[in-house]
Amino acid sequence: MVEAPKWPGPIGELMVAAGSLPSGPVKMSLLEEAIRIADSLRDTDAGYRIRRAYIDVAQDCMRCDVYIVTFSWCLAVAQERPDRYPVADLLNHYHGVLGWVGNFPHIARTDFEALFDDALAKYRAHGFSLRILYLKRRSVAIDFGDRAMAAAADGEFRKHPRPDGINPVEWEAGWQIYHDRFVGDEGVAVRTADAFFALPGRTGLRDALVANLSLLPLLHVGRTADAAARFDLGQRPLKLGSGFGWDHPDRLEYLARTGDSNRAFRHFEAQLPVALAQTDALTRYRFLRPVAALLARMEAEGVREVSLNAPESLPWYDPDGVYPLAVVGDWARREATDIAALFDRRNGSDYYTDWLRITERTFLNGSPRGAIGNP
């Protein structure tokens, strides 16, 4: 048995403490301090090993900014010393970088293409399946609002079978529903979810992602009873520091579209602190788009004041917890509009602005079967 290498100085205590904790802000802080010490000692080996653990925690917490920076550091070291730090050991993280870079409006399409070409070359050189790269390319096409890119990536994705033990089937089903909805195939999205739930062993929270993503397509095709059942199946907690799931706003939007504005507003309240803690603009847009539309409809319905447990970081925070709805609604719409403008400027389109406008129009019309996907 090979003895594990020892950590220098006080790093060992930090790593033991971090190892006893679940992923979250405290664990991240301990690993950050361990990295700081390793870098101060110019101990590349310790810095590399700590960062490998840090990448996993960043992924769990959906801290895509930390994930991208940490992976880039590790890849640079591995490329300098591939004899000691094999590049192949990092490649299962490269697709995560590809999936997240589009979430930042300052990262241009050309930057993504350069990263994708580099990842493609490395996957081929090391004999990795290209399926996950094209799956992520297909999902990033949605971030860029590019259906031609999505269609081309989908064609390449289907050329590569799913390797055993790679890409859990529930994640592939979720990504497939995102794609189906993006290209406007709501019926296909429903069939994707139905096929998933027809598989053996589909139970509980593990499948919440697919359940939530199928809610709006089910409403669109008129299967309201099935949507209600999937809503119950999709219940899972949101916890500050654990990352914000993009399927959670679908639950809020489902409630709003079925006329349950009160429960939709409470979902907004529950999701608000976690969504605002995310560091990428696209996650905040995904949250704020249906929220802005919900609050506009509530105001149109005559609601003037709301009770809300809001984070203190918000500029309109009041310790009394009672707010004019117009103040909260104006904030949500302004934030969503500003973020939409950033991504539209990058992408050279009106995609995100149009999506917000379409959502608001549909909510105000009160139709659960209106346009639900991307514009």
Image (cartoon, rainbow, N blue to C red):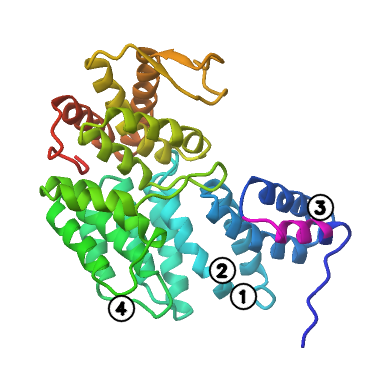
> Residue 46, position in %: x, y?
77, 64
Q: Residue at x 39, y 76 (%)?
A: 129
Mark 1–mark 3 Cα distance, whole angstroms, equals: 24 Å
Q: Residue at x 36, y 56 (%)?
A: 208
Q: Tag 2's secondary structure?
A: helix
Whether pointer 2 and pointer 1 mark residues with C-beta atoms closer than 8 Å, the reply is yes
Whether pointer 1 and pointer 3 mark residues with C-beta atoms closer than 8 Å, the reply is no
Q: Mark 4 sits on what residue?
A: 161
Q: Tag 4's secondary structure?
A: loop
Segment tinted magenta in the rendering: 13-22
Type of amino acid at the residue the image marks with label 1 = Pro
Q: Residue at x 19, y 31 (%)?
A: 358
The label nearer to you, 4 versus 2, is 4
Q: Which residue is drawn at 38% across and 24% down?
A: 332
* Disc 3 packing (10 Å; few <14; some 14–19; many ≥20): some
Q: Tag 1's secondary structure?
A: loop
